[in-house]
Structure formats: structure tokens, C-alpha cells
Amino acid sequence: MSATLHPPMAAGRRLPNVWDAVAILCVFGALIAVGHVAEGTMVPINAPGATDVSLDPVNLPNYAIRTTLRMFAALAASLLFTFTYGTAAAKSRRAALVLVPILDVLQSVPILGFLTFTVVFFMSLFPGQVLGLELAAIFAIFTSQAWNMAFSLYQSLKTVPADLTEASDSFHLTAWQRFWKLEVPFAVPGLVWNTMVSMSGGWFFVVASEAVSVGDNNWKLPGIGSYVALALERKDIAAVLWAILAMLLVILAYDQLLFRPLVAWSAKFRFETTAGATASDPWMLRLMRRTRLLKIAGEAVGDALAFLGGLRLSIGTRPRDNFTRPSRALDATWIGILVILVGLAIWRVAVFASSALTWPDVAEAVGLGLITLLRVVVLMILATLLWVPIGVWLGLRPVWARRAQPLAQFLAAFPANLLFPPVVLFIVHFRLSPDIWLTPLMILGTQWYILFNVVAGAAAFPGDLKETAANFRIGGLLWWRKVIVPGIFPYYVTGAITASGGCWNAAIVAEVASWGNTRLQAHGLGAYIADATDKGDMARVVLGVVVMSAFVVLFNRVLWRPLYGYAQRRLTLT
């Protein structure tokens, strides 16, 4: 016979415990650190110490906090962009004709290109204030995070299993309810892994984002990126090692406090009818579950979100059973408008560049683009052959995936600039060709998009399908061809699109390497843009960015988009 639980005893279970004290101390400590660092953003640019960077390791904790806050601010903006832009591209066929190519172009535009055109805008919002520089740096980091996350949500929304969609129709869910009750949960596992790799992608370009230039004025925002840039400039190896250690500690901290609990939480959204392999809950998640006040607050937030997601709203979407064929006349009109707008944009670019460029300049940029294209193709093939088997192995073994998670994040975040000293010395010492030996730097930060997406795909692979394959004793090459590759293929395409675009972007950093007075330069479009940026030649910067964007869009249209369509038609679980 069970004991009666009296109201005072029940209320006692709601009182704070020691775990609440630990959690509250952590929360208040984080808020105090954020407030302390935020004070530095509300001062004039010319204030003492506002934009000064010192190589004293004592300053690294402060720099690490400031860089991390910039990255999380950019991550919040990236999530907002993902749930608006990615959803619109997946839900509207006509909008996709515009939004998907724009996304292709945006992921190919180098961060230097964004900084060139956006710094003046943010500086005009807060003239003479450090906040303007901070917003410019956050936007630059945003451009290295958002596109991958938007592609992830787009891929998930386009590959929702048909039987789940039919079930939502049977329950008469509105478009709003179906989005929050079905489509977002289905997208969560892949989005969590892509959020991790996007966070690491922000670290990869943090050196460029924290150095802000307007005309003859150059500012370095206090942060790990500026610390690394100054250490490389002064050839201070000890400072470089201190920066690497600080990066490692920061990545381990937010992996333990944020991403490990998120990965464990996202496992409950896997699409399967039988229980798959899982790892034990991380310590942070267990700590949060042991608290009482935070648990009550979490339940209240969860109930509020569930209420909002359950509202019977159907904004802008017709009922599925009343679906009619799209109007061809309206499609033709829409495409005609797009052609006119694209033509006007090309004409404006041509007018801007025609005064300083000639057709031989265009031919030179296109030729260098073909050289970089060859590098991208070779690197994508090598990265696929290496990381797809490793990603599948990790994704099917959650325990090992959790062990490898912080290491993969650190390697993905490792800036290419930090490898310039050994690479330059190696090439000079052995008199090697920069055209060949600088190439691996291009894939250094982008190969991880393939790994993280393949891990997400393998982790989300239904356990009942794995059991079926085991019961039929399907193994070897047949298992790869008929079981796992079709299951992870949509995820792989998402990672490959972002990785190939990232390779083009990284070419600006990788095709030019310097250490002290030694400068090595490979032939390619990235080196062309970097050289034009250093010289302040805006016409050639625009030409290089346009040619690079054209190559990326063409590459995506010829290869990746057809593969996306094939995955949606033939490889969606039903």
C-alpha cells in the first residue's frame, strides 16, 4: 500500500536544493561576466584601451569571453535567420526560385567581401562608438554560421517522411501546428549538429572578423582573433600557443555546458519505431534535472512553447486537401520578373566595374577561378572518401560520437592562420610549389561540415531499419549501397554544399600565407581577391566576388541541386 503524500511534503519537494544553488551560482556568474564585458562596447572608439590588444596572457580570459559572446550573438541571429529564411525556401516553390540561389551566392561571398560593404553601415548606426565595430564583427561571424544552418533546416523540411505528413493530415493539424509538432522536431537532430559545426566555423574566421577597417583606419577589437593576428604579426610563437590553449578551454566549456545536453535532448526526436543505441545522459543534463527551481522554470517555458505551437493557426497556407495546380501564367510572370531583376543587378555591376576593368581582366579572373575550382573538386572527393566512413561509424555509436565531439569541434574551429608558420617554413625549406602545398589549407575548416552532417544522418538513422538489415544479414558493400548511404544521403548533400561553398570562401585565406617577411601565394581566385583587397582595388574585389559567386551557383545547379532532388524523390523515408 502506497504512503499518502501530504501537501506540506509535496510542497517540500518544490523547495530549492543544493543543485539549485550550484546552477544559480553558474547563471549569476555568467551574467556578471556578460555585464562586465558589455561595458567595453558602450564606450567611444578613441577611449583608452577600447581597441587595444595586448599579448599578455593575463588578458586572454577577458578576450575569450568577448569573442565567445560575439559568437553566441551571431548564433542567435543565425537561428532567427534559419527559421525564417529556410522555412520560406522550403514551403514556397516560387520563393525557393529566389531564396535558394541567393543562399548559394551568400555562402560563396567571402567574409572580406561582407566586411568591405557592411562596416560603413554599422559604423553609421553608432558613429564613433565601439558598438558599431562590435555589430560589424558579429555580422561577419553571422555570415560564417547562418548559411549552413539554413541549408540544414531546408533539407529536413523537404525530406519529412510521407507517412508522418499523412498522420498530421489525419489529425487535421493546421500548417502552424504541423510545423511545430512535426517538421521542427524532425529537423532538430540535424540542426543541432549543424549548429555545432557553424559555431566552429565562426572560430575559423574569427581572426578576419575582429579586424575592422574603414579607409585608412584600422581597429582590432579585443578578442582571441585579434590576439592571434597580433601574435602572428610579431612572430610570437608563445602567444600563439596561449591562444590555442584558450580556444581549447572555451570550446570544451560550451561543449560540456550546452552542446552535449542538446545532443542528448535531440536524440528523442529520432524517427524510429524501436529503441536505438543511446549514450548515458551528460552530467550537465543530469544536474539540470536534479534541480527544483530550474526544473519548474523549464517546465513553465516548455508548457508556454507547447501552447504556442498548438494554436490552430494556418497563416498563408491553403489546406492540403484543397490543393490545386499552380498557375503557369503566374509562374511565367514571376520568372520574368526575376530575370529582369537579375539583369539589372548584372548591369549595375558591369557599370561599376567597366571604368576600371577590361575584358582581359575578366578572362584572368575566370581562369584563376577554374584553377580554384579544380582544387575544390579534388578536396571534396578526398574529404568524402575520408569522412563519410568515419562519420557513419561515429553516428551509429553514440558513446564514441560523444567522446569525439569536443575534439571535432576544436579541429573544426582551428583557424588556418595558426598553421601559416609551419606551412610556410615547410614549403620554403623544401622548395615546394605553393600551388600544391597551400591547397590543404582550403579544406582545413570546411571538411567538418561533411563529418558533422554524416554523423547527424547516421545518428538519426531508424533503429528498426538497422535491425531489419541485420536480420537479413546484409553486410559489406551491399550494406553501404542499399542501407546506410541512402539513409544519410540527404544529410551528406547538405554538408557537401556547405563544404564546397566554404572551400571557395577559405581560398582567400589559404591561397596566400605569410610568416614575418615571407609571403607565399598560389595561383587562384582566392589569392586574386586577397591581393585586390590589400591594394584597395574595389573594382577587382567586386569582379573576384562576382566570379566566385557565379562558379558556386553553377556548381550547385549542375551537381548538388539535382542530387538534392534525387534525395527528396527517392531516398525519403516513407
Image (spheres, helix red, strand yellow):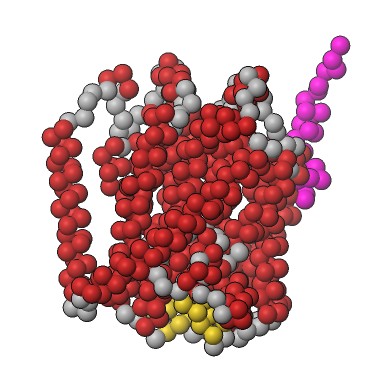
Q: Residue furthest bottom?
A: 517
Q: In the image, what residue occupies the spot 50% across and 43% down?
A: 492
Toward the viewer: 336 or 46?
336
Observer able to see residue 332: yes
Q: Using the image, determine if residue 265 lies above or below residue 518.
A: above
Residue, far top: 1
**Percent position (x, y) of residue 427?**
58, 77
Choose between 279 and 266: the one closer to the eye: 279
Asked which quadrant contains residue 290, the reply is top right
Q: Is residue 496 above or below residue 517?
A: above
In the rendered structure, the answer to whether residue 357 lies left or right of residue 471 reads left
Q: Quadrant of residue 501?
A: bottom left
* Magenta-span inclusion, residue 199: no
Residue at 61 percent across and 64 percent down: it is: 414
- Residue at 44 percent across and 55 percent down: it is 377
- Write the start and end of the magenta stretch as one range: 1-22
Front one among 287 and 383: 383
Q: Quadrant of residue 162?
A: top left
In the image, 266: left or right of 26? Answer: left
| Magenta stretch holds residue 11 | yes
Tell me residue 549's x, y (percent): 33, 60
Say if 427 sits above or below 337 in the image: below
Position of residue 461 measured from the top left corner of the image (x, y, whole percent): 58, 31
